Image: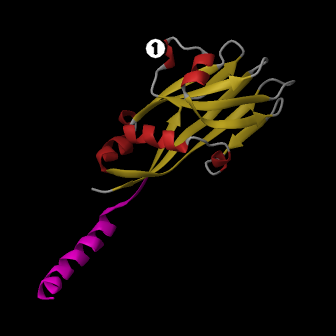
């Protein structure tokens, strides 16, 4: 009993200190706008911890990914046909691999799908709305923990003509010093 009394203050201090020194950190990774049409049906971004100071500074402290989502704005310039597209991720650089859009669909992991835009319309997907389209969250989390990935916007349709802007990957991690 005497040992427990001596040990208890140290245990309580460790528990309190652990709660104080861990916390959530939000990363917002903005991606460049892209245009997709029938001659260019996909575009790619390399996303790495090296390009985001907060992510890079806390990489070794990440305990786990708490949340991840996207924001984006899609404008359908085609006045006659609806537009649709998906977002994929991969560890492979499609351009280095010589991939076309079919290779991306076959080899990358789809993480956002089912987004459609009316002819001549604009659609804004907020961070919270992105969950309606998000899949394969476990793969996204793994790539975030690895610190690098390639993200692909893939347009679908015969008369494709869209502008994708205000694209951001929003990540919340739990970290400790």
Instruction: Identify the residue at horizontal 20%, vertical 81% (top origin).
Output: 8
Front residue (pair 40, 144): 144
At mark 1, the secondary structure is helix
Is 139 placed left or right of 81 in the picture? left
State whether residue 88 is above or below residue 103: below
Residue stretch in magenta? 1-25
Q: Quadrant of the C terminus?
A: bottom left
Residue 25 visible in image = yes
State whether residue 129 is above or below residue 49: below
Q: Which residue is mark 1?
A: 96
Is 27 placed left or right of 109 in the picture? left
Instruction: Give the percent coordinates (x, y) of residue 90.
Output: 49, 28
Mark 1: give few (<14), some (14-19) or many (20+) Cα within 10 Å: few
Q: Residue lying at the far bottom in this picture: please name it.
A: 1
Instruction: Give the percent coordinates (x, y) of residue 50.
Output: 35, 34
Q: Residue lying at the far right in this picture: please name it.
A: 80
Instruction: Identify the residue at horizontal 62%, vertical 21% (top origin).
Output: 42
Q: Quadrant of the N terminus?
A: bottom left
């Amino acid at each position: 009993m005497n040992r427990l009394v001596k040990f208890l203050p140290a245990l309580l201090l460790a528990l309190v200190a652990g709660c104080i020194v861990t916390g959530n950190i939000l990363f917002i990774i903005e991606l460049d706008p892209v245009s997709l049409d029938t001659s260019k049906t996909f575009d790619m971004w390399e996303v790495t911890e090296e390009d985001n100071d907060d992510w890079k500074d806390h990489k070794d402290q990440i305990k786990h990914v708490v949340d991840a989502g996207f924001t984006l704005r899609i404008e359908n310039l085609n006045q006659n046909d609806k537009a649709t597209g998906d977002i994929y991720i991969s560890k492979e650089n499609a351009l280095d691999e010589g991939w076309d859009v079919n290779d991306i669909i076959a080899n990358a992991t789809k993480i956002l799908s089912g987004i459609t835009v009316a002819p001549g319309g604009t659609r804004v997907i907020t961070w919270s709305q992105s969950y309606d389209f998000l899949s394969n969250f476990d793969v996204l989390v793994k790539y975030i923990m690895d610190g690098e990935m390639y993200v692909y916007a893939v347009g679908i349709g015969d008369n494709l003509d869209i502008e994708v802007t205000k694209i951001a990957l929003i990540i919340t991690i739990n970290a400790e010093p």
